[in-house]
């Protein structure tokens, strides 16, 4: 058995540069299927339990689509209120039960550490789709995959890059996972821009500093926008004890085309895990950037499907059989025209 087959994916800490490269080359191989140029039925008959106990649009649907694109079926539950967890069932029991219905489980839950606890009761691999403010490993992988591709088109690499992370760095699990994943690379400058109260946790800063990277902490956006990658985040209002407290921070850091033109490099790549908060009091990433070629947010979304397909193929041990189970696409599709 290799390092992926039958294994849970709970934290980015389980990956090194080699395993990241394996995931990325498997994701590259998924492109023709995601673009509907061809189909594969490699997971025909397999069942994904897609268990989302916290709000989600793209992560949940992209996990499901990725599994369907490999020919598998998806069983889903959404929300806590409609689950037996609201009747006092333990995560262990829920996992024991759900894993008897599925071959692999993707799970999101509002509590830090919950997905790991759940995995202990599961008889099948569990993939963490976000556990509270802790981690979001599949998002970090798709972000890193996107960063690698965007930088390559600017003739740069992850090694030696400058990334600015902006917004709610305390509760934002995507920046926690991405920072830890980046610790595997060399000589990165991290500009961490947040309100003082929403600073990156010390545990994450220690991981990147111990790996030899440079960390610069700011509480202002002005003067700190000339990074290679600008990664914005939403204020995570659902994580505050008093949700009204989020109003204090919302809208503090905003990017629009005018600010970009004035302060960013001509090829600074703009990223955001989405959803961007487009309410007027926040508007962290203005829609006037939509035509900016360096806005990578929708490419992140597309890459998310490739990464999740790769993780399913690797976890279920079929990554070398994908092409063997190929067939033609027989419906109209314009997805193959552009990427
Ligand atoms: C993020 C999350 O859920 O952590 N969304 C996502 O999965 N793409 C970011 C967020 O909700 O702000």
Image (tube, rainbow, N blue to C red):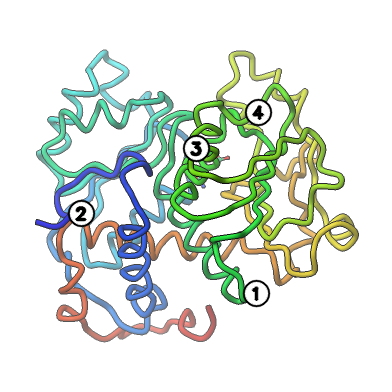
Q: Point out the tag, 1 or 4, that comes first from the N-terminus.
A: 1
Q: Is mark 1 on a helix, strand or loop?
A: loop
The residue labelled by disc 2 is 4
Give the mark toward the camera: 3 or 1: 3
Give the mark toward the camera: 2 or 1: 1
Quadrant (top left, top right, bottom left, bottom right) of the N terminus: bottom left
Q: Point out the tag, 2 or 1, that comes first from the N-terminus.
A: 2
Relative to 307, residue 117 above or below:
above
Residue 263, how many percent across, how many down?
Answer: 86, 56
The residue labelled by disc 1 is 154
Q: Is mark 3 on a helix, strand or loop?
A: helix
**Disc 2 packing (10 Å; few <14; some 14–19; many ≥20):** some
CA–CA distance between discs 2 and 1? 32 Å
Please state if 170 lies on the left or on the right of 49 as rendered: right
The residue labelled by disc 3 is 210
Please state if 40 lies on the left or on the right of 206 as rendered: left
């Amino acid at each position: 058995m290799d390092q992926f087959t039958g294994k849970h994916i709970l934290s980015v800490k389980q990956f090194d540069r080699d395993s990241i490269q394996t995931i990325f080359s498997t994701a590259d191989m998924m492109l023709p299927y995601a673009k509907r140029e061809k189909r594969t039925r490699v997971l025909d008959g397999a069942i994904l339990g897609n268990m989302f106990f916290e709000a989600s649009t793209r992560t949940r649907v992209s996990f499901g689509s990725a599994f369907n694109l490999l020919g598998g079926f998806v069983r889903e539950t959404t929300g806590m209120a409609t689950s037996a967890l609201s009747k006092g069932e333990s995560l262990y029991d829920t996992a024991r039960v759900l894993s008897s219905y599925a071959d692999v489980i993707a799970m999101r839950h509002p509590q830090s550490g919950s997905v790991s606890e759940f995995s202990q009761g599961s008889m099948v691999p569990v993939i963490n789709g976000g556990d509270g403010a802790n981690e979001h490993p599949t998002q970090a992988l798709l972000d890193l995959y996107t960063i690698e591709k965007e930088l390559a088109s600017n003739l740069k690499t992850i090694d030696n890059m400058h990334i600015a992370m902006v917004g709610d760095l305390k509760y934002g699990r995507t920046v926690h996972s991405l920072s830890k994943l980046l610790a595997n690379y060399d000589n990165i400058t991290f500009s961490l821009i947040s309100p003082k109260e929403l600073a990156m946790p010390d545990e994450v800063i220690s991981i990147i500093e111990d790996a030899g990277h440079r960390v610069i902490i700011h509480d202002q956006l002005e003067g700190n926008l000339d990074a290679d990658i600008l990664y914005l985040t939403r204020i995570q209002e659902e994580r505050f004890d008093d949700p009204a407290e989020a109003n204090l921070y919302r809208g503090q850091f905003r990017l629009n085309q005018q600010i970009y033109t004035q302060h960013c490099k001509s090829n600074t790549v703009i990223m955001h895990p989405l959803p961007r908060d487009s309410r007027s009091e926040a508007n962290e990433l203005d829609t006037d950037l939509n035509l900016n070629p360096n806005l990578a947010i929708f490419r992140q979304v597309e890459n998310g499907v490739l990464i999740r397909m790769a993780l399913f193929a690797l976890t279920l041990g079929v990554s070398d059989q994908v092409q063997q189970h190929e067939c033609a696409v027989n419906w109209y599709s314009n997805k193959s025209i552009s990427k």
